[in-house]
Amino acid sequence: MRLGLMIDVDNCVGCHACAVACKSWNTSGTTGPLTDYMPHGEEPSGVWFNRIRHYEVGSYPDDNTVNLPMSCFHCKDADCVTVCPTGASWKREEDGIVLVDQDKCMGCNLCAWACPYGARELDRASGTMKKCTLCVDRIYDEALPPEERLPACVIVCPTHARLFGDYDDPDSEVSRRSRERNGYVMLPELGYEPTNQYLPPRSRPAIPIDELQARRQGPSTLPERLRRWVNRAIAR
Amino acid sequence: MKPALSLILFTVSSGAGLGLFMLLVLVNGLGIGPAMAPGEVMAAGILALALTVVGLVSSTLHLANPRNAIKAFNRFRSSWLSREGVLSLLFFPFALAYLVGVWSGGDAPPAWAQGAGIVALLLAAATVFSTGMIYASLKPIRQWHNPLVPAGYLLMGLATGGVLLSAVRVFGGAAPGPLTALTAGLLLAGGLLKLIYYFWIGRPAGPTLNAAIGFTGRRAHLLDVGHGHGTFLTEEFGHAIGPRASLVLRTFALVAGFLVPLLLLIALGSGDASPMVLGVLVVLSAFAGVLVERWLFLVEGRHVVNLYHGAQRT
Ligand code: SF4
Ligand code: SF4
């Protein structure tokens, strides 16, 4: 098995709900807490497993806003595990999940240096490295109803931009969508072979404007021309 | 990258200490220059071990959770940091055995001491090489992911060690003779290597912001980084310096670290000026230069995560 997430960039609206749900679940999970530094101070900051960044691709008017949530990609060839001197960072044989054993980590930061994707964050309070666990403490929990055995971020996403599944299984939803929609991984040239994939935006106009155009070219009756003139005058 | 003081002190101090020990075994074993008195060997040896220990202790200051430092020896087979730790610890018993042998054996140290010295030399070299490989093995930082890095660590460890050994010999009253020539050669090689390195990292290379987010074709830029007040990532990877400051500091590192010590050693070899003063000056200049060089090496490493934070290139 090779478990991972899939982000549909076409659907993601950049609301940060996944990051909040992640923090809320994981702060009392296996690698919790996710410490906040001065949460009520002037400059609050803290540990997060998932961060969302926003980009503009192209320039106006031919541009798109792209929201990119990023968490650990549970890479196949994970250098973060190779460089770890203590053995705290490890990759599970059975499902490929990369974890940090909080009892072994000495907080040397080397794994965070080795990760190209900024997926690891040191917790200053515990002195140990923390990162996405793929909700390993949810997805196998038989006390939960089967439909809830999913990472917290996947459950909460209001636009269904997040999927979870086994990339080794060619019939899984993530594998199928990857084939249909040209799923891609980030920075493949570095050779980490990330598991998590992204689905690029579909190419289609963002908002249908046919009706608008038809109206614009519509009959030029007097009231219509008057209305356009008023519109332009007010716009100025 | 963040230029952590603990890492600068560690690599400079341990590098010089291990370099000094390597040269001590070579100079004493091969009889380069006038024979070394056992007292001189001891002084150089103890200085080498002290610098190495200071460096290693300083490296533990870098750890956020030093309680688990002992576990760092666990992954010798995969991690260069673990290898460095194991090799540096193995170095000490052999180095001590060598010094004890030289001390007790006087002018003709026993064969086992010579053997221990050679093993210590090899372990010291392997330790410094591992230090370089910790950086060189990191693919996300293109300025570090390069064979010049471990080569540079070895050369600079040897050069600063040579500077120290020359000073020890001067204070021991001997004319260092061919040792100054050897050290001058190491300084020259080290300086040239850094020069090549600076040219090499100056060339734009590596992925762009577009490549990092997987959108090619139209140019992309950051709209919003998504966090308010800095994160672990910005603290650790957000450091950089401008081109002007970089040029000034690189020049200082090359001049103070390599050129001035080289000229001082030539003056020392010609025997005109007061050797003690020259001995002190050469050490001060070389270490000032190498400390700046190490600070620059760290701060000029640009992690690819900076692309996700809006940099167009690293
Ligand atoms: S994304 Fe980073 S932390 Fe996660 S497995 Fe890959 S290299 Fe390791
Ligand atoms: S910070 Fe912890 S998990 Fe990361 S490399 Fe160091 S010991 Fe391993």
Image (cartoon, rainbow, N blue to C red):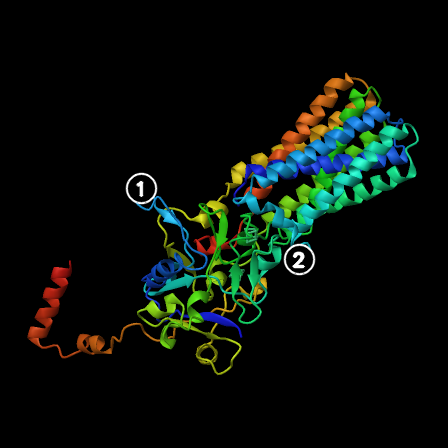
Q: CA distance from mark 2 to mark 1?
A: 43 Å
Residue at image position (78%, 37%) is: B95
Amino acid at pointer 1: Glu
Q: Chain of mark 1?
A: A
Q: Quadrant of residue B137?
A: bottom right
Q: Is residue B187 visible?
A: no
Residue B248 drawn at (x, y percent)? 57, 34
Mark 2 Cα shell of 10 Å, populated few (<14), some (14-19), many (≥20): some
Pointer 1: what residue? A42
Mark 1 Cα shell of 10 Å, populated few (<14), some (14-19), many (≥20): few
Residue A214 drawn at (x, y percent)? 20, 78
In the displayed structure, does residue B130 sit left or right of residue A146? right
Residue at image position (10%, 74%) is: A224
As drawn, the residue found furthest toward the front would be A143
Q: Which mark is residue B78?
A: 2
In the displayed structure, does residue B179 sit left or right of residue A56? right
Amino acid at pointer 2: Ser
Residue A73 drawn at (x, y percent)? 49, 64
